[in-house]
Amino acid sequence: MSPSPISPQPATGLPVTWLASAAPVPYPEAVAFMEDRVAAIRAGAETQAVWLLEHPPLYTAGTSADPKDLLMPDRFPVYASGRGGQYTYHGPGQRVIYVMLDIKRFGADVRAFVHALETWGVAALARMGVAAEPRADRVGLWVDRGGGREDKIAAIGVRVRRWVSFHGMSVNVCPDLSHFSGIVPCGIADHGVTSLADLGMKAAMADLDAALAETFAEVFGPLAKG
């Protein structure tokens, strides 16, 4: 498994290579690639990278995962993950965005970096006509469905090794939302999960990818120190 550079590269003005994988990538292979890329970035042998991909259906357990939140342990493969957070579902129809970036370029502030990821997701979804927002007491990006109901449309979880990030963000484009029922997503049982398709959007994965590329520099460009 080796992702391909996107051609042409998004005009971000930053030393970041954009990668993409057309076929779903098994989770262990994705983690192995990220581990290698992070080490190469640290060594100055590779550029920073943003990787757009999908996974086959699976659950991941973050460092704060509570075993009781895994409701259907035999439904899909379950992988321990070094990222922050709790249980998350990944699968076809969900855009996974792995970010392998040198956080020292962004002020060496992990909290600010996570906030930048949230801001990026909000900006990209706004280009799609979706008003998503972060919440101080809940991880991820949320959509107000009215009547006090809020559904999660994007999950965020990062890991940092010697100031280089990996893992990142996932946005629900058109996944099978019933697959989320095997877990308590991110440990939050009082709210639901949504997607662009569930919101009535006819957007394709490529539309979200374009929105992500168009808004990346708006968020990360002003933060980068070169």
Image: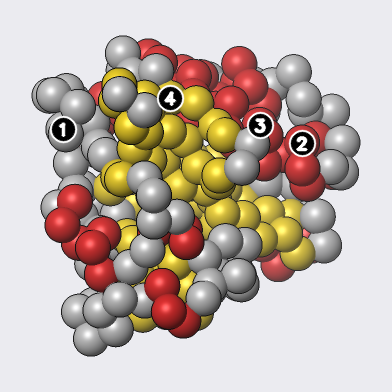
Q: Looking at the picture, how far across and down is residue 59, in whole percent?
A: 35, 70
Q: Which element carries disc 2, helix, strand or loop?
A: helix
Front in this rendered view, residue 114 or 73 = 73
Q: Residue 190: x percent and y percent?
A: 39, 49
Residue at x 45%, y 55% (from the top left corner)? 188
Marks 3 and 2: in contact by CB < 8 Å?
yes
Disc 1 residue type (three-letter): Ala
Q: Earlier in the sequence, mark 1 or mark 4?
A: 4
Q: Specify which label sits upstream in the sequence, 4 or 3.
A: 3
Relative depth, front residue between 72 and 7: 72
Check disc 4 and report the residue beneath it. 132
- Can the viewer see residue 105 in this picture? no
* Element under disc 3: helix
**Picture quarter containing residue 58?**
bottom left
- x, y (%) of residue 184? 37, 63
- State the residue position of label 1: 197
Considering only vertical position in the picture, is 73 above or below 82?
A: below
Q: Which residue is mark 2?
A: 112
